[in-house]
Amino acid sequence: MDAMTSLLPESRTRARTSAEVTADLRHRRPLVLVATLGGMGAAAGVLVVLCALAIVGWFLTDSGSFGQPGDAVRTGATAWLVGHGSGLRVSGSLVTMVPLGLMVLIAWALWRAGHRVGDSISGHGPDADRIADGERDWTVPTAIGLFSLTYAVAVAVIGAVTATPEMGLDMTRATVWGLLLSAVVGGAGIAVGSGRASIWLVVVPPAIRAAALTVWRILAGWLLVSTLMLLGALVLDFSTAANVMSQLGTNGTESILYTLVTLVVAPNAVAFSGAFLLGPGFTVGAGTLVAPAGVVLGPLPMFPLFAALPDAGPQPGWTGWLILLAGLVAVVAVIQVQRRHPTTRWDEGLVRGLAGGVGAGLLFGLIAHWSGGAIGPGRMTDVGPHVLDATVRAVTAMGVGGVVAGAGVTWCQRRSLRAD
């Protein structure tokens, strides 16, 4: 509300109070300084937390008798860079899988930092009336450019300080990812915090906004269903996961750290679960397959999440019906959106459902692509969903479900209007 208030024209009929003057000054802080410090703060936030956790883990594990505190700090910084897609090569073993849990944490920090930057600079540039009259406003683009450039430089600097001859990091990829994440996620936070997003959304046609909401509802619903599937599989075979933890021989502190690592890669497992429900499934090593049609496994590392894998061999016949879930999720999501944003136009109802389903399917394909990669040497260089097949099936199932629901709800709303 403060950001929006700063964009409204000042009343000329009364003198401004000291509180209003203070609020106005708070929203007119130097743009270059605020955006640059915001990018640095966004980089430092998660980095400091990971380094602190690494130091605590180093100290609690064997009372810090091995290595130095600097090694723990380097471990935390490396984890932060891996969350940006840098990958890792140690002793010939390649790890390219991006822990999506870390990426989500980094994105959240970027959003919060961007929102604070946007609020601080909301008093810059033309007000709402002048923007509506067509006056160009470069406040937000300038802030996004400075914010993302500072963040990308921070990623490159941390990579240069952290990398060692024994440890390979793909800093080009990490820097590009840092630039994109800060520009997209942090930039969205700046636009919202500055109040400009509210002004820009006014000119977006309602049909497009409803379609975007449909995409979000379908994607969120599908990720929820995939998460429930993963949790159900873990609960059914919880004894195997507990047995894995016992065989690792970890103490209480090490078990907590191991659990944190598991939570960091849990979103990757959710994407694997979604690919399984769609039919194509995923691999957990070269020459393996986990799909409703059948499961072929090989030797696996001792990791608790692998307890959720089904037994090798043919699967029960009912698993083939799981492919219907994607269409049902799309139907439910479209019905919810159409109830909040009713329409009696056939073209709008059909296009909204189709665009929502296709968009959600494509976004899930991107998530599935990011969730896979190498996690070790040998056969473990091929771990992840069958991205292309999963994307095609997601687009098809969700698109068809969206169209059917869009047509059905539109028909019901037209009939209700005629009855009234």
Image (tube, rainbow, N blue to C red):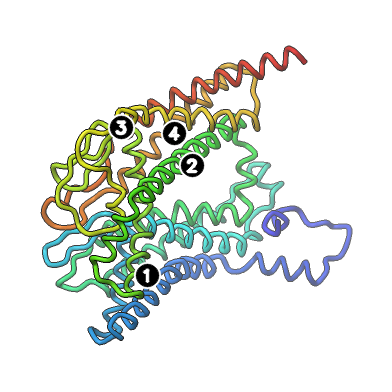
Which amino acid type is shown beneath numbered disc 2? Answer: Ala
Residue at image position (31%, 48%) is: 308
Nearer to us in this view, 161 or 141: 161
Which amino acid type is shown beneath numbered disc 4? Answer: Gly
SS state under label 4: helix
Q: Earlier in the sequence, mark 4 or mark 1?
A: 1
Say which of marks 4 and 1 sits in front. Answer: 1
**Cα–Cα span, label 3 and label 1:** 34 Å
Q: Is mark 3 in CB contact (under 8 Å) with mark 1?
A: no
**Cα–Cα span, label 2 and label 3:** 19 Å
Q: Earlier in the sequence, mark 2 or mark 4?
A: 2
Task: Assign the N terminus to one quadrant of the image.
Answer: bottom right
Residue at image position (80%, 72%) is: 18
**Cα–Cα span, label 4 and label 1:** 38 Å
Nearer to us in this view, 266 or 243: 243
Q: Which residue is mark 2?
A: 220
Q: Which residue is mark 4?
A: 359
SS state under label 1: helix
Q: Is residue 95 left or right of residue 213?
A: left
Q: Earlier in the sequence, mark 2 or mark 3?
A: 2
Q: Which residue is mark 1?
A: 256
**Cα–Cα span, label 2 and label 1:** 29 Å
**Cα–Cα span, label 2 and label 4:** 12 Å
SS state under label 2: helix
